[in-house]
Structures are given as C-alpha cells and as structure tokens.
Image: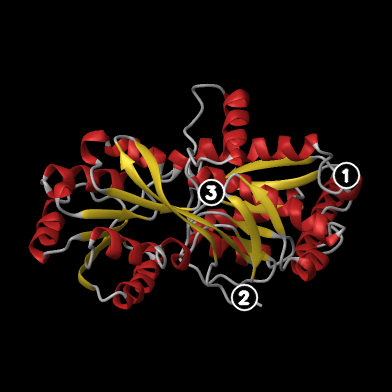
Amino acid sequence: MKNENNLNRRNFLLSTMAASTALATGTSLLNPASAAGSLKIGLMIPLSGPAGLFGPSSKNCAELAAETINNRGGIMGRPVELVFADAGVPPAEATKTAIRLMLSERVDAIIGMHDSAVRAAVIGALKAKIPYVYTPVYEGGECAKNTYVVGETPPQQLAPVIPWLAQNKGVNKWYMIGNDYNWPRLSNEAAKSYIASVGGKVVGEQYLPFDVNNFDANIAQIKDSGANGVLITLVGGASVGFNRSFAGFGLADSVYRLGTLIEENTLLGIGAENSKNLFSSAGYFGNINTLENQNFVQRFQEKFGAKAPVLNTLGQSCYQGVLLLEAMAKRAGQWDKAKLAATAEGTTFDSPRGTVTLRNRHVDTNVYLAEANGVSFEVVKTFPNIGSGATCS
C-alpha cells in the first residue's frame, strides 16, 4: 500500500508539473491529439447572474453556427465541437474556468460573451496560448495578443448615431445614466466628443449600482436638467426598471432615449406602454430586412422552435464569433495560432449582420439604429461598414 501511495503521489506530481509547463509554454499538453479529431471551441456565456437572460440565445446561436459549419465540412475538415461554460461569475472564478477549458477540455479556441471584467480575467488566464474571440458590445481598446473582437464599440454605436439624432430629432442636450463600471464610463467618455462635434452638450451624468431598483431621484434630476436626450448604458434589469420609471414620470413624450444595450429581451421587459421615443443602436436586430438575416431567422426557428429565446445582438454575436474562427482558418490555410494571427487582418465573411471584415483585430460592420414600436424594433437607419476605431497592430 505504501509503494502504491508513493506511485500515485509521484504520478500526481508529474501530471501537475506537466499542466503547469503547458500553461507557461503553450506546448505539449495543449490539444496533443486534436488535429486528428474535432475542433473544440469553448463558449463562455452567462448562464447565471445579471446577464443570465442572454445565455439561452447565446447558446442557441453558437449551436446553429456549429451546425452550419459542420454541414459544409467543418473547419479545415474537422467538425466543430462546442464546450459550454458559465461566464456569469466573478472574474476569479472565470479564470479557473478558462484554465479548465484550455488544459482539461483541451479546447482549440475560446469565445466569450460576458462583461469586460471577465474578459480581462480570461485573457490573463489564457496567456495568448489559444485564440480568444470576444463577442459582445464593449468599450473598445482591447489589443491583447491572439484576441479578436466582433462586438460593437462606441465609435460604431455612437459616432454615426448621435449626429443623426441631432439632425433628425433635434437632440442637443444629453443626460447620461449607466451602471458603475468601465463599459458605461468609457462609452460615455467617447460619446462626449461626438456630442460636442455637433454642437450639443452634456447636462448630467450618473452611474448606479447593478442592484438599483428605485430611479425616482435620478429621473427627477433628468427632468430638472432640461435634457432632450438620455444616453442609457444600464444593463438588464436596471435598464428595464429605469425605462419603466422614465415613462411613468411622463418624460417619454418629450425626451428621446438612446440605449446601446437595449435589445429585444430588454424591450420586452420595458413594455409597449413605456417605449415611446426609445431608440437602440446595435450591429444586429432580429428583424433586419436582408436575405442573409431572413435565412438565419428561418433556420433558427426551424432548429429551436417557436418557444426559442428571442434573437438579439448579444446572442447573435456568438454566431458571429464561431463564423469568424472559420473564416480566419480558411484564410490561414491551417489551424495554427501563429498563422491565424499573421493572416487575420482583412478576413471577411458574410453573416446575418451583413459583410464583416476584420481590421486591427476588430470588425468593420453595419450598424443599425432602430426605434421601438411597442415591443418590437424598426430599423430607421443603416450605417454601412462602420469601423471600430481600434488601432491594434
């Protein structure tokens, strides 16, 4: 028994040392047999927490992307296999999840649809050993090695939209309200320059905790400020609660609202009676009137049925992320992280959002401005092929 224990202890130490070496060097233990089998992609999506609302649609869209790619032969002839993990967790836990996916699950890449704090944790855990695709709306500026972004940035969502609202709706006095973390704060810093460029001004700015549930004082300040436009960077339930209260105070009749994370799920929560003069800017809406999107929606409904989660920009971004990896591999001619990185610039693929081109490890893409009509969005303006503003080399 003693010898057996010593042997087990020795094997454990050896395996631990091998895992540590693999994490540090990106060699031996990472996907040693993957070339002969499936191409495994880890999907870190919110299955719990405040953003858990977007988990089901994210999962469905990723599954549809994998099916689409496998039906045309896989990536470099290898069938795509998805491995899902919960990203609706604190950054420290997300770090452990990313390491598990890379070392235990031996995934070939990770796609992340989660907040920016988790993104930083994942990037730190992966250490650029495998490709990482970040898909949701975010504040911009991420240039970590072997990291690629398909989500919308402030130069895409706000730079063309704020001038349009100034010219077409007369919005020139803006109040900013968002949750208190880096995405709202950095997005609003960018917005200030776009507002100033058209002669507008910011008349107020507030940041609130995620668990806020009373907005009376905030809305009173907005009313007193004389704002005729409100830029909303609240997330999920906070956005629902704010917009309901805003309309309840009677401000929806005279003040325009613009959200950069108000998608179909959030709009359903806000309700038809509270959505007057509410606009949203995004790279995707479920009713984009293009042949590519109509085909996508039809396949989504056929696969998941009438009770499937509603399509939205965050869920659909996971579809984009999987398609980007396919397009990068096709351009590179092989699945090798160095070759993928060397040939990534200029990668182009067609998607439900339109034609997408990777530049500076972000995407140039169409941006859609939609106005709420009850609990549906109607696209009122398309801004084609807008650059992300990224300067990654």
Tell me which amino acid carries mark 2: Cys
Nearer to the camera, 244 or 20:
244
Q: Quadrant of residue 127?
A: bottom right
Residue 264, position in %: x, y?
A: 40, 39
In the orientation shown, which residue stands out farthest toward the front? 168
Rendered-image quadrant of the C terminus: bottom right
Q: Is residue 38 above or below residue 339?
A: above
Asked if the residue at tag 2 contacts the one at tag 3, i.e. Cβ–Cβ closer than 8 Å, the answer is no
**Distance from the alpha carbon under mark 3 to that under mark 2:** 25 Å
Residue 255 figure quarter: bottom left
Name the front one of labels 1 and 3: 1
In-image side of 14 versus 393 (left or right): right
Question: Which numbered marker is on residue 87?
Answer: 3
Residue at numbered disc 1 = 77
Q: CA distance from mark 2 to mark 1?
A: 30 Å
Q: Is residue 103 visible?
A: no
* Image quadrant where residue 80 sits: top right
Instruction: Residue under label 2, please give it.
Output: 392
Label whose residue precedes the other's in the sequence (3 or 2): 3
